[in-house]
Amino acid sequence: MVFDQAAYWKNRSKHYPEEFERHTPELRRFFCEQEFRFRQMLDRIDFSEVESVLEIGCGFGRMTGMMLKKLETAARYQAVDISPEQIKATKEKYGNRIQTRTADFRTEPFEPSDIVLVSEVFLHFPPGQIQIVLHKAQRLAKKYLIHIDPLLPVPESSRALAGRVKNYITGQTPLRWDWQHDYPRLYDYAKVDHLTVFPVGQGKSMIFLIKARERVGNRMPEAQRV
Ligand SMILES: C[S@@+](CC[C@H](N)C(=O)[O-])C[C@H]1O[C@@H](n2cnc3c(N)ncnc32)[C@H](O)[C@@H]1O
């Protein structure tokens, strides 16, 4: 079964805000904590010098408003999503305060921005694509990359994924296309000090704050640039 990211999100986006309304109390608490930690993290950033933000996979703008509150009114905010429905929802919420664009982060070019925000998006990229998109996001971030994603210590094996697909085909579970990536290895964060990690939900998810200026070279493989 081939994963068509655009088609999957086009379909799922039609009901995505309702997904949030149906969350279990536990999941609701998790997202509340995530948003609280995100605001705490934003307090660490000196916004006086931030003139531009690129948000990748903005969804219906859940994190957008919190970031906008911190920005000077003149700052440019571009919210991007592969799904036109999500873009429409975000545009309706924030109107002319932001620029919106329906685009696939994997294939389209983007202007570098002071902050690149990517929340709960990279989990939807299969293992073969994750290094490429992570590297692309890092390159586009002139000052900070803020990256929010679930984190499990062990990435999903192809066997586990096959099991997930099988359960879907046999009608046992709806198919959720997401993966737990090995971010400690991808960021090599045992060795670097430009990365701050904020755990959420007892470490089930992480907010990574990566300061671009102090980045030591480009740790991601050059050959894999998009
Ligand atoms: C789980 S939602 C997260 C939405 C929002 N960032 C949040 O934290 O609530 C993932 C979003 O990523 C978008 N997305 C998935 N693949 C994408 C791609 N290749 N390029 C741009 N956006 C993508 C989806 O359409 C969806 O809105």
Image (tube, helix red, strand yellow):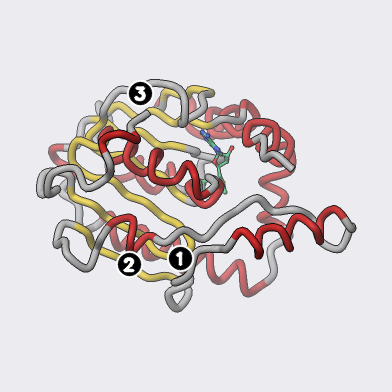
Q: Quadrant of residue 110?
A: top left
> Where residue 3 sits: x, y (%)?
67, 40
Q: CA distance from mark 2 to mark 3?
A: 27 Å
Residue with the mark numbered 3: 110
Q: Quadrant of the C terminus?
A: top left
Which type of secondary structure does the marked residue at label 3 adopt? loop
Precedes in sequence: disc 2 or disc 3: 3
Residue situated in front as seen by the camera: 110 or 23: 110
**Amino acid at circle 2:** Phe
Q: Quadrant of residue 51?
A: top left
Q: Quadrant of the N terminus?
A: top right
Residue with the mark numbered 1: 151
Residue lying at 41% horizontally and 27% vertically, measured from the top left: 98
Q: Is residue 118 left or right of residue 12?
A: left
- Residue at far bottom of view: 202
Check residue 198 in the rendering and tell me which mark sits there, or answer none: 2
> Where residue 18 sits: x, y (%)?
72, 49
Which type of secondary structure does the marked residue at label 1 adopt? loop
Precedes in sequence: disc 1 or disc 3: 3
Residue lying at 89% horizontally and 58% vertically, measured from the top left: 170
